[in-house]
Amino acid sequence: MHDLDRNARAAIASVDPTPMFAHYPDNPWAVFKAYLDAVTQEATDRTVPAWKGRLGAADVFTFDNAYAMFESLRIDYGVLGPFGVRP
C-alpha cells in the first residue's frame, strides 16, 4: 500500500494533461477521463515491476488498485494535481 500511495502521488505530479486538452478541445469530461486513465496507468507502471513475481497477480490487478488509490487521494485527501487544490 505504501508503494502504491507513493507511486500514485508521483503519477499525479508527473502526468501533464495538456495534450489531453488538445485532443478533446470541446469535451472537458473526455479530458478528465483521459487524465484519470493516464495517472492510473502511470501509477501501475511504477508499481508492478517491484511486485511482479512477489505478489500474486500484481500484473493483473494493480491497475484497479491504483485507480482506487488515486481516487482516494483525489477525493478523500484533496490531492488534485493540475486540477487545483480543494479549499
Image (tube, helix red, strand yellow):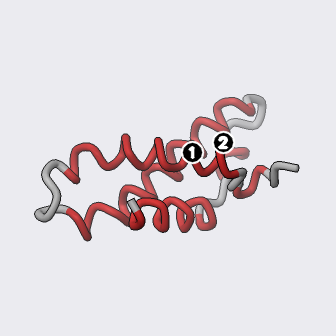
Q: Which mark is residue 25?
A: none
In-image side of 23 versus 52 (left or right): right
Is 64 drawn above or below residue 80 in the view shown?
above
**Residue 48 percent location from the top left of the image:** 28, 61
The amino acid type of the residue labelled 2 equals Ile
Q: Which mark is residue 72?
A: 1
Residue pictured at 71% horizontal, 46% vertical? 22
Q: Position of residue 12 (x, y in %)?
A: 60, 59
**Helix, strand, or loop for circle 1?**
helix
Q: Nearer the viewer, residue 84 or 30?
A: 84
Mark 1 crowd level (few <14, some 14–19, many ≥20, 10 Å Cα): some
Q: Residue at x 46, y 65 (%)?
A: 7
Callout 1 amino acid: Ser
Q: Is residue 1 left or right of residue 83?
A: left
Q: Which quadrant of the figure contains the N terminus? A: bottom left
Report whether 15 appears left or right of 45.
right
Q: At which x and y percent is residue 9?
A: 56, 63
- Provide the secondary structure element on which disc 2 rests: helix
Quick one: 45 or 4, which is closer to the camera?
A: 4
User: What residue does disc 2 label?
Assistant: 75
Image: 50 above or below 57: below
- Residue most toward the right? 87
Comparing 32 with 2, the one in front is 2
Circle 2 crowding by C-alpha within 10 Å: few under 14, some 14–19, many from 20: few
Q: Is residue 39 above or below residue 2?
A: above
The residue positioned 77% from the left and 50% from the top of the image is 83
**Separation of residues labelled 1 and 2 (CA atoms):** 5 Å
**Residue name at image x 65 percent, y 45 percent:** 76
Dots 1 and 2: beta carbons under 8 Å? yes
Residue 69 drawn above or below residue 15? above
